[in-house]
Image (cartoon, helix red, strand yellow):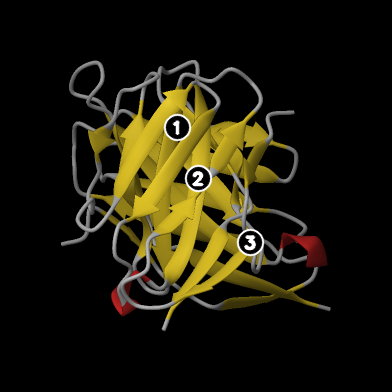
Amino acid sequence: RKEVEQDPGPFNVPEGATVAFNCTYSNSASQSFFWYRQDCRKEPKLLMSVYSSGNEDGRFTAQLNRASQYISLLIRDSKLSDSATYLCVVNFNPNFGNEKLTFGTGTRLTIIP
Amino acid sequence: DVKVTQSSRYLVKRTGEKVFLECVQDMDHENMFWYRQDPGLGLRLIYFSYDVKMKEKGDIPEGYSVSREKKERFSLILESASTNQTSMYLCASSQLSRTGANVLTFGAGSRLTVL
């Protein structure tokens, strides 16, 4: 089983729709979680951190479910500019200086006019 | 904004050549990383560094070495390039989030083709 697993998509969604995707992780001791966004032929950029209580940033909502070991990203009122690949990142840090950041392979999202 | 600059966007090298990929960050970050990104495999960590002259192996260090002589500069070296090292190479520098995890800022990437 992969350490961090995402549905690669592609998700083709009409503009204005709501879309959600999940990411599962295998290490129950994982401590921190993030969503990064990567545009075509560009570098990944931090979209948002994922906190235990869930968090929202404008049209984006991130949730963490520790019991089932997954995180989710919800995008409301999707825009054409949301088209990108969304990378799930999980952090495991058993002790200082031994941090392990693991990236998922990404979920590709295309918003259709 | 943190800026991470990679010296070369595109390189084409021949098998057996020595390759240097340079990365510079301008925000005085302690931590720097080198990843490679391949279709279907995602980002994989090659090496990282938490301080000057300090380096740690990542998940796939074989065939690579690194150098961190100055805080702002982290270089990736392919001693003898091979075709399976054709990839997108991404440098990153980081600051800690409120949960204590590294939040990465990436450079634009260096696409290396080894013939």
Question: How many C-alpha atoms fall within 10 Å of the one at disc 3: few (<14), some, or many (≥20)?
Answer: some
Q: Looking at the rendering, which quadrant does residue B111 occupy?
A: bottom right
Residue B2 image offset from top left, x and y in percent = 68, 29
With respect to residue A111, does A34 lie above or below? above
With respect to residue B80, does A32 lie above or below? above
Left or right, A22 with reference to B6: left
Judge depth for marks 2 and 3 and give the one in front: 3
Sequence-first disc among 2 and 3: 3
Residue B66 image offset from top left, x and y in percent = 34, 41
Sequence-first disc among 1 and 2: 1
Residue at 66 percent of width and 62 percent of height: A39
Badge 1: chain ID: B
Q: Determine the secondary structure under disc 1.
A: strand
Mark linked to residue B74: none
Judge depth for marks 3 and 1 and give the one in front: 3
Amino acid bearing label 1: Met
Residue behind mark 2: B91
Residue at 64 percent of width and 21 percent of height: B27
Residue A29 image offset from top left, x and y in percent = 19, 31
Of the 4 image quadrants, the one containing the C terminus of chain A is bottom right
Mark linked to residue B9: 3
Which residue reaches farthest front? B17
Residue behind mark 1: B32
Of the 4 image quadrants, the one containing the N terminus of chain A is bottom left
Amino acid bearing label 2: Cys
